[in-house]
Amino acid sequence: MTVLFVEQIFNLYEFDERLNSNHLQYTDFFRKDYPSTIEFELESVSNPVCYLERCAIYDGGSRAFEPKIYTNNLIHYWESLKKSPLNIEDYLLVKSNFMDYSLSYDDWMKKRIWWNGVSEDKLLALYKKGHDSVNHLTNSQFDEVIENRLTNLYKRRK
């Protein structure tokens, strides 16, 4: 049996000098310039730190078969962000469409043509949640976000 869940189309990281020290070319998936389902998007904006992760999906590979290595790799990645030349907003702009939630609703919708036909109530609720999340995350100190994520990862490793 084959089961396929289509939540979002991701793009494959190729190269950006600002990210090259902590991202793997032709391996890491980014959440940029492709559609996602409303449900996946709502889940993502509910936990916006996901937009800062090295790779948008972790369902296979070391996570499934070598969880200790997976967690250690995540810790190494988040530690490397301490040396990043980018601030949160720049990082989000390079890796995702999350900063689109800082646009007006109409401008945000112009970039979301794949959601034509979705109920206005659902879209407004998603936009509000995303707008609040982008404001919360971008008003946070990057080092504080990094330390919070590392604390959670160190707990998981035990």
Image (spheres, rainbow, N blue to C red):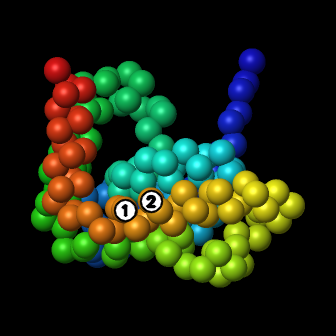
Identified by mark 1, the residue type is His
| Residue at point 76%, 57% (across, down) | 121
Residue furthest to the right in view is: 117
Q: Distance between the Cα atoms at labels 1 and 2? A: 5 Å
| Residue at point 38%, 29% (across, down) | 63
Label 2 Cα crowd, 10 Å radius (few <14 / some 14-19 / many 20+): many
Please, what secondary structure does the residue beneath circle 1 have? helix
Image spot of residue 57 (x, y percent): 48, 43
Label 1 Cα crowd, 10 Å radius (few <14 / some 14-19 / many 20+): few
Viewer-proximal residue among 91 and 131: 131
Circle on res. 136: 1
Q: Is residue 124 visible?
A: yes
Viewer-proximal residue among 103 and 80: 103
130 horizontally vs 136: left or right: right
Viewer-proximal residue among 155 and 73: 155
Q: Quadrant of the N terminus?
A: top right
Residue for badge 2: 133
Identified by mark 2, the residue type is Ser
| Residue at point 16%, 49% (across, down) | 147
69 horizontally vs 56: left or right: left
Image spot of residue 117 (x, y percent): 86, 61
Residue 14, by quadrant, is bottom left
* Tags 1 and 2 touching, CB below 8 Å: yes
| Residue at point 68%, 51% (across, down) | 38
| In the rendered image, the vertical position of residue 60 relative to residue 28, given as above or below | above
Image spot of residue 108 (x, y percent): 63, 75
Q: Is residue 12 visible?
A: no
